[in-house]
Image (cartoon, coloured by chain):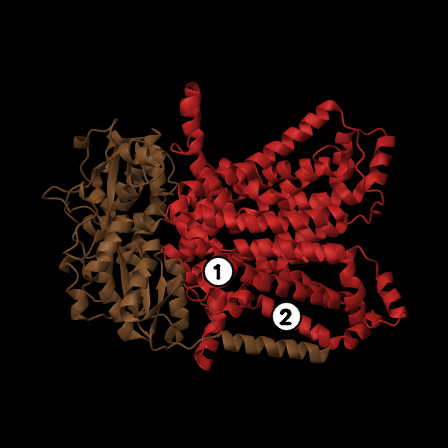
Amino acid sequence: MKKNILRVIFIFFVLIITSCENNQKPNEINIYSQRHYAVDELQYENFTKQTGIKVNVTKANADELIQRLKIEGSSSSADLFITVDVGKLWQAGDMGLLQKIEDETITSNIKKEFLDPNNFWVPLTFRSRIIVYSKDRVNVNELDSYESLADKKWENRLLIRSSSNSYNQALMSSIIANNGPKVAEQWSSDIVSNLARDPKGNDRDQVKAIAAGQGDLAVVNSYYIGLLLSSEKEDELNAGNSVGVFFPNQRVDQSGAHINVSGIALTKNSPNKENALKLIAYLTSSVAQQTYVDNTYEYSVNPEIEPNKIVKQWGDFKKDNLDLNMLGVKRNEAIRIFDKTGWK
Amino acid sequence: MEISLNQIKKNSFKSLIVVLLAFIIVLPIIALFVISIGFDTTNFFYFADYLLLDYTLSTLYLLVLTIFFSFLFGIVPAWFISTSKFKGRRFYDLLLYLPLAIPTYIMAFSYGDILSFSGPFQSFVRDFIPSLTTLVNQDYLQIEVLSILLSFSLYPYLYAACRISFSLIGNNYINLSKNLGLNELKTFFKIGIPLSLPAIFSAIFLISMEVLNEYGAVSYFGINTYTSGIFRAWGSMADMETASILAILLFLVVCFFFFIERWITNRYNYSFKSNSDLSPNFKNSYQKLVLIHITSLIIILAAFVIPIIYMVNNIFVDFDNIDFFDVFNLSKNTIFISFIASILIILVVLFIQYVKRISNSKILNFVGEIISLTYALPGAVIGISIILLFAPINDSLGFLLIGSIPVLVYAYFIRYMAVAVSPILTSFKKYPKKLDDAGKSIGLKPFQFFRKIFIPLNNNAIIIAFCICFVDIMKDLPLTLILRPFNFDTLATQTYEYAIEEMITKSSIYSLTIIIFGIILLSILSIKQSKK
């Protein structure tokens, strides 16, 4: 009996040790990613074909990945960290989990306005948080800015998802950074009193709710409209077609439409740094950027690449030129305003 | 007492291993306490001031509603199927287990889409019954709707527990009750329910844990539960320490209810003689038959058939884009990891229960109980505490344990242990101690007796425990997401990734594959159960 148990324990240990891996491998890189679009795998495959470097990915939620990076410390095998919200990149940088990227090939791929002043992250794509409205019930001339969504005329007509969602947290952070916390708080409580229903569902559900007549306008990420308009389901296509797209804050004296980037960062202890930089350079190159634009309806950060034709027909727009790091810096304050004003 | 002390001494090696195993199992909880030592209280008090009451109330409301609907969907058909004879009984019995194979978040996302304005339900009404268009055009993302959807995938826990219990009550008591002039309804309330209380309580415990741990579906429905609070503290405020404190508080509350449950169970543990004649025996009036068929059919249709048709339809819509090789690969991963973890769990649970039985010590009894409690912690929190546990080993040994298969299996092991304990324990308790003595008298050593007689006797329960474990691990999301090796996807993670990116159509092939495997296993379970 004792012998048997000891034998089992021994075999178990051998199994554990043999199944574990070393950090550093000559031709591999390891990514912790919050992005889980099918196009990402395509990008990595193309990169491997071109360079022979194998790309390993673990996909999970940003907060869990940040925590894992923090706990793993210097023994972490991760080379790169990818998120869909720049606030999380700022947070990882702030926690000392990242190292600066100073690489001419990479920065030359990207429009200056999107670069991180501190060089802790590199943008891969960007998206805007736009207003969509019912073509039947809203005249586009009535729309103006995020701030004007607080207007009494939108009472019981506005749709937006929960404040737990990081896209909304980023939007609120930008409003705090642009207008100050007092204005932001008033804005938040006015928005809550204008809501047609409690915040719920995802961005697509807000559009569907407009189609259903439960509200007249909604705040959503731009690429979801692209996805609806390219859907193979007729009902989704109809929902997409029933709304108009409006970029807020476009007047000369206004800040421009809020944008957020999906970005990549080099971890502090990256075991395969050189290869990791090669991947960043590849992902920001025009070939890879074209692949992003065609598959996810996001905007490219590379000046050479035009948006997909569905997205392009909405026209060019003025972007909020706030330092994107503010979307992380102001995050905690944003949450508190949400809670205080009852934005669920 | 002296005898049992002696026995403990005799079995000291085995008891030591049990205590060691229990320690390994509760290690993450200890780690969680360690994380939260010396935490900054600002966020916690902020949370307590602004959110705690609201979040707790909506959690309780959701919990009560879900338990209520699970009762409705679970107990009523379980009673009819256990006590009446009618055509299609076996068929219903099988189908009523199956919704357990549908993960709660898939149920919620699917119905969210089915009921939405652009979904099939409203489109159908618009095209064929236009007069009802405005009536059905509602906002369905409500807490009440969510509770019904959650109970669709959770009621089988109650159904399974009551099926066993009602069958065991059997004819003797029911005949007695008939002779005393009680009708079926009264028999149900006066005999059926009271004698099944322990089974009902343990099922409610599992259902409550699932509801408390649910995150995907509740956040989609915009409902703030206690677990959303944990994630809000963690994610939005970047404060893992406060999240841990909240998790520990939840854990303590759950412990409290767990021990109350045990207390009630022990109090109500009527040792009734289970019955020899299992054939169902209530007479079926015409009205009753209609009632049986309608209730069973509605439940099966709503909780199982409709979601399945929806997924199959999605698969046809997206058929050209499906990567079947990928589906095959992920199925392989999923089966591999669920199989290893379930086998390990069953072996350890058997071992612990066996040692508990032969040593008969209070300490070991207690140990046997506490290992079930890890089920109360949110999966993502267990995930982080496991990373915390293994990080020092990473550092000192130079190879990576985190993100390896053994650590993932370990995580499943501690998380899903509770699921296996209850059927095995229930089954063991049925056999009296006399049996062990009989084994001794024919010269078998305890371990031999256990292997040659006890395990075959409890074969059914072991298979049931294995199946439920397997299905649960297959559906697991939070642990797999954060602890899996590089490039290791399972059907559940892939389903989730598409669903979270709002591509439900693409996720359907993966969720349907989970469900198909689940159906196969649950069919085995159902067949075993009816043999039992």
Amino acid at dot 2: Leu
**Quarter-wise, where is residue B128 in the image?**
top left
Residue A271's spot in the image, x, y percent?
33, 76
Q: Which part of the image, by quadrant, shows the C terminus of chain A? A: top left
Left or right of residue A181: residue B212: right
Residue A72's spot in the image, x, y percent?
41, 72
Indicate the chain coloured red by its letter: B
In terms of depth relative to the viewer, which is nearer, A193 or B446? B446
Shade of chain A as shown in the rendered figure: brown
Can residue A321 be seen from the camera position used here?
yes
Q: Which mark is residue A137?
A: none
Provide the chain ID for the residue under circle 1.
B
Residue A80 vertical position relative to residue B514 in the rendered view, above or below: below
Q: Which part of the image, by quadrant, shows the N terminus of chain A? A: bottom right
Amino acid at dot 1: Thr
Residue drawn at 69 percent across, 77 percent down: A4
